[in-house]
Image (cartoon, rainbow, N blue to C red):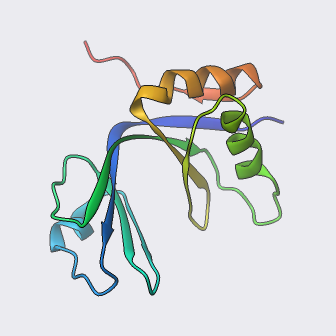
Amino acid sequence: MRMTLAVHTRQYTIHSFSPNAQLPSEVFAEDVYFIGKTEEGLTLVISSDIKLDSLEQEPNWCCLEVLGPLGFSMTGILSKVSGTLADVQISIFALSTFDTDYILVKKNRLTSAIAALKKQGYQIIEPEAAP
């Protein structure tokens, strides 16, 4: 059985901060954000609508959400999706939550990513076009 992926309507920016940075409260009011912290730094993925003063930032990422929930016993999901995209030279930024996985691709590669995934049998749910 092949997975279904949904394309988010929002674009995201990946920010880099120092590991001891204090994030503004507006971050935590967002519906979707991801934070990762190590000794070397703090990474934040958030809607590109939110403008932040980070050390570095990479805008224009689109999100493909693997529709779940996915049990921890399910294996190889992220590997198969990322492999499909690597085969057509598309870089990803992968994120996981307790329930599912998210694959970010640059906006200028989204159409190619969708085509490659569909070719491999994945179902893709795209947002409705704006009138």
For the image, the number of numbered tags is 0
> Residue 19 falls in which quadrant of the image?
bottom left
* Front-lying residue, 131 or 24: 24
* Front-lying residue, 112 or 65: 112
34 lies left or right of 16: right
Relative to residue 118, is residue 26 depicted above or below? Answer: below
> Residue 124 falls in which quadrant of the image?
top right
Relative to residue 63, is residue 51 depicted above or below? Answer: below
> Residue 121 falls in which quadrant of the image?
top right
62 lies left or right of 11: right
State which quarter of the image contains the C terminus.
top left
Residue at 78% from the left image edge and 35% from the top image edge: 2
Q: Residue furthest top?
A: 131
Residue at 61% from the left image edge and 56% from the top image edge: 100
Relative to residue 116, is residue 37 depicted above or below? Answer: below
State which quarter of the image contains the N terminus.
top right
Residue at 43% from the left image edge and 82% from the top image edge: 40
Residue 93 on image: x %, y %: 52, 51
Residue 63 on image: x %, y %: 46, 42
Residue 70 on image: x %, y %: 70, 56
Relative to residue 108, is residue 36 depicted above or below? Answer: below
Residue 14 on image: x %, y %: 36, 56
Residue at 83% from the left image edge and 64% from the top image edge: 73
12 lies left or right of 4: left
